[in-house]
């Protein structure tokens, strides 16, 4: 049956007067489409920490805009004081979440603009920071389309695709990353059958991926995380597409907790497994997955958050890592806006990015 397709929601944007960043509150989806207006640094930090804005590329775009909005508030300072405050604020925002490299990447770009323009007034520099933020946003959209173009060559019309967490437009804007081939293919008249892992504990697959694909007219079926093996065994899956929060130089990559298990299952069943992400997610300074800092989150996310009553005794020990690292040996290819990288990853990533 033809599904209803609707325009994508705005995920992050500047207010018309450019004095605030407006974000879609992703903690309220799928039942409420609500926006938050952000004008101060603590609220910006909280928005990232609470996952009101989330997904590696979207966090990067948000951080770019947040620095523009916040720095307007002290643009009367002399350069040295301005530069000091700007750097402090960037470090502060960077402390909100450790795993996705896009956050520090965008903040570094903005600090770079400030440092490179030492002779100019703070107000002139703020205008340049604004331009840089818009550039980060525009580049991100272009990268998403390119990932779609490359990624769609890996599947054929009618294929079943499994994805984990949310690396759709809500996480990455545009076409998303893991979803980019799906949306791009849809525009070319292709149909895919997408299986979306619900993704415990914060249910990004259920709340966000199945929501955005359904609303976009894509055939999506939500499954619990522990059902992935069964649908693979039943032959329903031709490829696995997931996002990435940080790709190490050797091709190991961090993504939402549970991703490495999906990769192991895919290997077992002989199903190609791809991670899709922009070059801003590749961190050549991180040698292997062992060097990636994995965020540990609030125990109540697994003890009680989604339940009418707690589902564990309060004294029960918890372990709630938000991400895991997938070993490069389990990865068929890494799809970027510059092309698809195949093993040996260390060598081929360097070649593609001239490092
Ligand atoms: O904790 P989240 O919701 O920010 O985690 C998001 C993911 O793990 C995504 O899959 C990842 O950011 C890739 S999106 C390009």
Image (tube, rainbow, N blue to C red):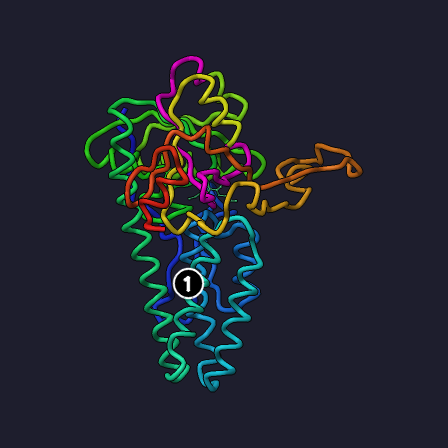
Query: Quadrant of the rendered structure where residue 340 is?
Result: top left
Residue lying furthest left in this view?
188
Check disc 1: other Cα within 10 Å, few if <14, some if 14-19, many if 20+: many
- Residue 247 included in the magenta stretch of the image: yes
**Where is residue 70 shown, x and y percent of the image?**
47, 71
Give the labeled residue for mark 1. Answer: 64
Q: Residue at x 50, y 34 (%)?
A: 326
The part of the chain drawn in magenta is: 231-259
Taking depth in this image into account, of 140 and 36 the one nearest to the observer is 140
**Where is residue 204 shown, x and y percent of the image?**
49, 39
Q: On screen, 214 above or below 36?
A: above
- Residue 252 included in the magenta stretch of the image: yes
Under tag 1, what secondary structure?
Answer: helix
Label 1 lies in ligand 1 vicinity (Cβ under 8 Å): no
Residue lying furthest right in this view?
315
Q: On screen, 2 above or below 13?
A: above
Taking depth in this image into account, of 42 and 34 the one nearest to the observer is 42
Query: Quadrant of the rendered structure where residue 266 is?
Result: top left
How many numbered dots are placed on residues in this image?
Answer: 1
**Where is residue 97 shown, x and y percent of the image?**
56, 53
Taking depth in this image into account, of 167 and 193 the one nearest to the observer is 167
Relative placement, left or right, of 259 versus 349 is right
**Where is residue 290 shown, x and y percent of the image?**
57, 41
Q: Quadrant of the N terminus?
A: top left
């Amino acid at each position: 049956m033809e599904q209803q397709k609707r325009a994508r929601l705005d995920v992050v944007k500047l207010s018309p007067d450019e004095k605030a960043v407006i974000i879609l509150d992703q903690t309220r989806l799928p039942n409420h489409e609500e926006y938050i207006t952000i004008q101060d640094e603590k609220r910006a930090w909280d928005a990232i920490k609470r996952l009101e804005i989330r997904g590696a590329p979207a966090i990067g775009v948000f951080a770019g805009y947040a620095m523009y909005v916040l720095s307007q508030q002290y643009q009367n300072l002399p350069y040295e004081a301005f530069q000091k405050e700007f750097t402090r604020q960037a470090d502060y925002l960077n402390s909100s979440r450790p795993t996705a490299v896009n956050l520090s990447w965008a903040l570094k770009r903005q600090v770079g603009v400030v440092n490179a323009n030492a002779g100019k007034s703070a107000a002139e520099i703020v205008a340049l920071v604004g331009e840089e933020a818009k550039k980060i946003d525009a580049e991100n959209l272009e990268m998403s389309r390119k990932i779609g173009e490359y990624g769609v060559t890996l599947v054929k019309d009618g294929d079943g695709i499994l994805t984990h967490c949310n690396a759709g437009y809500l996480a990455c804007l545009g076409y998303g990353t893991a979803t980019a081939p799906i949306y791009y293919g849809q525009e070319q008249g292709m149909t895919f059958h997408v299986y979306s892992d619900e993704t415990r504990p914060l249910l990004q697959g259920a709340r966000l991926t199945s929501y955005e694909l359904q609303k976009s007219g894509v055939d999506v079926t939500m499954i619990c995380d522990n059902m992935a093996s069964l649908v693979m065994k039943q032959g329903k899956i031709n490829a696995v597409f997931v996002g990435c929060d940080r790709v190490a130089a050797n091709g190991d990559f961090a993504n939402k907790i549970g991703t490495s298990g999906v990769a192991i299952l895919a290997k077992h069943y002989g199903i190609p497994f791809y991670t899709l992400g922009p070059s801003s997610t590749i961190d050549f300074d991180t040698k292997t997955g062992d060097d990636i800092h994995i965020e540990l989150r609030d125990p109540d996310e697994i003890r009680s958050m989604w339940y009418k009553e707690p589902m564990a005794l309060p004294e029960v020990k918890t372990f709630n890592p938000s991400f895991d690292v997938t070993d490069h040996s389990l990865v068929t290819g890494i799809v970027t806006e510059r092309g698809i990288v195949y093993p040996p990853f260390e060598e081929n990533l360097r070649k593609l990015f001239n490092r």
